[in-house]
Amino acid sequence: MNKGICQLPQCLKCHWFLLMIQVFLNYQNDGIYIHVLGRRIVIKMPKDQVDTNFMLTLRYAKWDPRGFCCLVPNFANNIENIKSYFGNRITLFEIQDQISIGNIPNRTISKNEVLAIKTVAGRVKIIFGFH
């Protein structure tokens, strides 16, 4: 099993990467493209020092080298700040629905069992039965 290839068809990391590819496939270097994907705001824009300085003022904004875009968390009033700053320079503004994983079965754990779940963030959640 390759560590770089995801074996799950509903993996959120793979889904996120495929959405980014789909979103910016037709990107032209002439405007500002903003996509709201769940809890993230993805901004693709031409290189400009003034715009870059504005993006640095947003809390927890970071550059994604894989997608050549800026990622901003979707909380507080980040969307309103971004819309008011860029104004009529926005070429495309799109809000996508939340990603649904589907039905996850309920599991019961007996006294001598441990359930370990690897989260999308790379952490391990451990659930164990007691009593």
Image (spheres, rainbow, N blue to C red):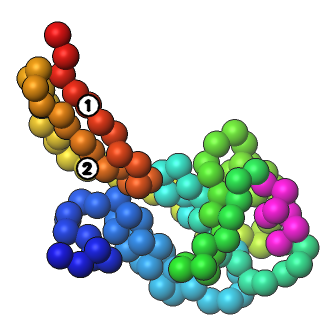
* Residue 29, image x, y percentages: 68, 89
Q: Please state, as top left, top right, bottom left or bottom right, where the C terminus lies in the image.
A: top left
Three-letter amino acid code of the residue under disc 2: Ile
Give the numbered dot on residue 127. 1
Magenta segment: does it hold 57?
yes
Q: Quadrant of residue 19?
A: bottom left
User: Toward the viewer: 90 or 105?
Assistant: 105
Magenta segment: does it hold 110?
no
Q: Which residues are magenta?
A: 52-58
User: Toward the viewer: 15 or 131?
Assistant: 131
Q: Earlier in the sequence, mark 2 or mark 1?
A: 2
Question: Taken as a whole, is the magenta stretch helix, strand or loop?
Answer: helix
Q: Quadrant of residue 120?
A: bottom left
Marks 2 & 1, CB-CB < 8 Å contact: no
Q: Residues within 10 Å of mark 1 (few under 14, many from 20)?
A: few
Pointer 2: what residue?
101
Please name the residue shown 65% across and 57% down the image: 72
* Residue 101, image x, y percentages: 26, 50
Position of 118 with respect to 104 (left or right) is right
Please name the residue shown 60% across and 58% down the image: 41
Q: In the rendered view, tell whether residue 93 sits above or below residue 112.
A: below
Q: Nearer the viewer, mark 2 or mark 1?
A: 1
Q: Residues within 10 Å of mark 2 (few under 14, many from 20)?
A: few
The residues tagged by marks 2 and 1 sit, at their Cα atoms, a distance apart of 21 Å
Extreme residue in the top direction = 131
Position of 93 with respect to 83 (left or right) is left
Please name the residue shown 78% across and 54% down the image: 58
